[in-house]
Image (cartoon, rainbow, N blue to C red):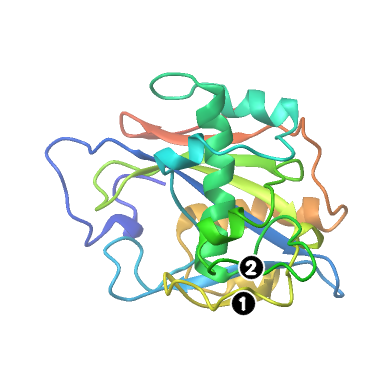
Amino acid sequence: MTLNDPELAGSRQFALAQKPRDSATLIVVRHDDNAPRVLLGKRHGSHAFMPNMFVFPGGRLDPADMRLKVGADLHPLVHEKLQLRMRGHRSPSKARGLAIAAVRETYEETGLFLGNIPDGATLANEEWDGLLAATQLDLSHLRFFARAITPPGRTRRFDSRFFVTDARHIGNLDNPRHPGSGELLTPHWFSFAEAQELELPMITRDILKRLQPLMETQSDLPADLPVCFQYYRGKSWREDAL
């Protein structure tokens, strides 16, 4: 990517680069068919950031995400990698909060929950707080796969962490608790080949290419897998391994 990339065309240019906001994304992959499939949804055309593009579920870190207790924590290696080169104050609770944000945003946008919902559980409501009152969060199946900071000049900038999990860890895979918040239109399972034919942000396309060969040979990624970190420095696109 370069600062003249077509994806930046039409995006408002700022005299000073906006500070990236912490965010998290969950990549859910199914292996119950002839080829692995990944969950993507189309962003509404009215959105200021990446309108009409297909993306993974995800969104901004909420301060409340950093205060939640979990039933099963992140793998220690995943927790450690999330804290590497963390902007601002390095915090174990922020690292955990990013993982929780990915789970929360996926639930809010699709109705799918990473974890087990007790049989016969009656939720106080279908919102995130109603779900939390009925179950405990299990982060142990999350794997930290990639990190990317939106280039300067975009309408929105995010410091995004991309987590991967196998769909068998979704407790209500074929029975979403609600139809979604409307952030993503008609979430759908696509093969990797089908996904590459969609209108995708460049970072999403890049991550799919990196993930596909791994998902074709395994369902759960190892916790010690190197994490690809992409960002701009000056006018050059950099790529490091965490």
Return the residue found at the far left.
Answer: 15
The disc label shown at residue 222, or none: none
The disc label shown at residue 39, or none: 2
Marks 1/2: CA–CA distance: 6 Å
The disc label shown at residue 188, or none: 1
Looking at the picture, tell me which residue is in the foreground, 197 or 154: 154
Residue 182's spot in the image, x, y percent?
42, 75
Looking at the picture, tell me which residue is in the foreground, 192 or 112: 112
Tell me the quarter of the image containing the C terminus. top right
Amino acid type at circle 2 is Leu
Residue 207's spot in the image, x, y percent?
60, 51
Q: Is residue 145 visible?
A: yes
Instruction: Tell me the residue at 61%/67% (across/down).
Output: 123
Instruction: Tell me the residue at 50%/30% (across/down).
Output: 94
Amino acid type at circle 1 is His
Residue 150's spot in the image, x, y percent?
38, 44
